[in-house]
Image (spheres, rainbow, N blue to C red):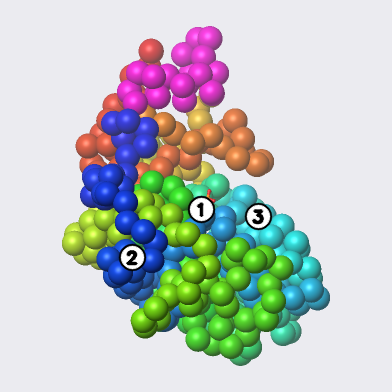
């Protein structure tokens, strides 16, 4: 959403155009180290192994499972949307015995049900911000339930949008994505793993590319780096720039800006007579899900046509509904550089025009 449907921080776009460096050039290594430091601040962690995986958010998810799960391991997964489903699929492909803890789409997963689901799981996995429904799942108490279980958290849509506290919450494995609240172009999956998790690394994971044992000696540490794969230089430039924008603003201010925009958007939608989809008390400010008042659409316009009109006439892209609410719910992202009051006003004005035509 915003003027132009896709709108990263200007600092991220400018950084992407920097002249190329070799991937073992000392200047690039220094910039990678700075990027990793900035990621530690964004994740609120001291984990030494914190770096951007060289592929989109889903690769962070794969890295999180393939490095820690061996065939037969019990993995508990909270499922209340498309990304929880994806976690189950990824874990199953690693040979995990997947124990699902389901909640209805639009509702949060019950953390106690996750703790109670298995006596001794290898991993308890949860999506912090379910982008498919706009629901925030509660995380803080998961580590207290099972001494040995690793807590794995999908933070793709939460980092830099709402409070994420990897160390304070004792999360062992977490990943994010660049194109959500971090406000950079897509292409990387910021990743972090605790020393406790690294003690349990699978010796030879089923993925060569995502093998943390090998990647670690390239992306972190002192002195010379061992080549593993060629880092996507421009993508890392852009992430470095976006993180600079977020940290210059201040992480707390960035969370507050997302919160204010989300609240204004959600209140404005209700004023227009729309009904919000996600459970009250668990609504994400950065992703608002709303029932589409299909009966109020202009004559001859269907749901997809209305989204198309928003894009063509106002330059605003809203997301279609997924899974059981496809065609019934819209998902309105208001994240990163796009989370500005003027964009909220623009969308609310556009909806008012469209639905009263
Ligand atoms: C977007 C998203 C992903 C997947 O990220 P890609 O960059 O599309 O691979 C995973 N989890 C959540 C919660 C997401 O919103």
Residue indicated by mark 3:
86
Q: Which mark is residue 25?
A: 2
Say left or right for 35 vs 155.
Answer: left
Residue 89 shows up from this direction: yes
Q: Residue at x 40, y 24 (%)?
A: 311
Depth order, front residue of 40/216: 216
- Disc 2, SS: loop
Disc 2 C-beta below 8 A from ligand 1: no
**Position of 99 relative to 281 (above/below):** below
**Position of 338 relative to 190 (above/below):** above
Say left or right for 108 vs 287.
Answer: right
Residue 318 location in percent, x, y? 44, 34
Which mark lies nearer to you, 3 or 2? 2
Comes first in the chain, label 1 or label 3: 1
CA distance for labels 3 and 2 = 37 Å
Q: Quadrant of the C terminus?
A: top left
Depth order, front residue of 341/355: 341
- Disc 1, SS: loop
Q: Which residues are magenta?
A: 296-315
Residue 122 location in percent, x, y? 68, 80
Comes first in the chain, label 3 or label 2: 2
For residue 103, which quarter of the picture? bottom right
Quick one: label 3, few (<14), some, or many (20+) residues within 10 Å?
some
Q: Is residue 307 in the magenta section? A: yes
Residue indicated by mark 1:
56
**Position of 285 relative to 276 (above/below):** below
Disc 3 C-beta below 8 A from ligand 1: yes
**Position of 51 relative to 246 (above/below):** below
Residue 172 location in percent, x, y? 52, 79
Q: Residue at x 70, y 65 (%)?
A: 91
């Amino acid at each position: 959403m915003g003027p132009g449907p896709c709108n990263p921080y200007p600092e991220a776009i400018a950084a992407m155009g920097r002249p190329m460096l070799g991937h073992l050039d000392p200047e690039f290594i220094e910039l990678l180290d700075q990027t990793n430091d900035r990621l530690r601040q964004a994740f609120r962690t001291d984990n030494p192994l914190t770096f951007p995986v060289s592929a989109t958010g889903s690769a962070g998810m794969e890295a999180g499972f393939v490095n820690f799960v061996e065939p037969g391991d019990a993995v508990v997964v909270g499922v209340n949307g498309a990304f929880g489903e994806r976690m189950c699929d990824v874990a199953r492909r690693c040979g995990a015995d997947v124990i699902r803890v389901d909640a209805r789409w639009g509702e949060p997963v019950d953390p106690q049900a996750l703790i109670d689901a298995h006596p001794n799981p290898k991993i308890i996995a949860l999506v912090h911000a379910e982008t498919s429904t706009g629901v925030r799942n509660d995380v803080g108490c998961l580590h207290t339930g099972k001494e040995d279980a690793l807590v794995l958290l999908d933070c793709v849509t939460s980092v830099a949008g709402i409070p994420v506290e990897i160390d304070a919450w004792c999360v062992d494995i977490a990943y994010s994505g660049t194109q959500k609240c971090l406000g950079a172009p897509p292409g990387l999956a910021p990743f972090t793993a605790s020393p406790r998790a690294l003690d349990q690394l699978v010796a030879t994971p089923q993925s060569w590319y995502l093998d943390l044992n090998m990647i670690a000696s390239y992306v972190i540490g002192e002195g010379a780096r061992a080549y593993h794969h060629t880092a996507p230089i421009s993508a890392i430039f852009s992430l470095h720039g976006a993180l600079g924008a977020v940290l210059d603003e201040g992480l707390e201010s960035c969370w507050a800006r997302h919160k204010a925009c989300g609240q204004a958007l959600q209140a404005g939608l209700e004023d227009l007579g729309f009904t919000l989809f996600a459970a009250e008390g668990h609504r994400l400010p950065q992703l608002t899900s709303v029932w589409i008042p299909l009966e109020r659409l202009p004559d001859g316009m269907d749901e997809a046509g209305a989204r198309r009109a928003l894009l063509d006439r106002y330059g605003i892209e809203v997301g279609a509904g997924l899974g059981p609410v496809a065609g019934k719910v819209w998902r309105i992202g208001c994240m990163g550089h796009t989370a500005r009051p003027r964009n909220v006003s623009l969308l609310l004005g556009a909806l008012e025009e469209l639905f009263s035509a």
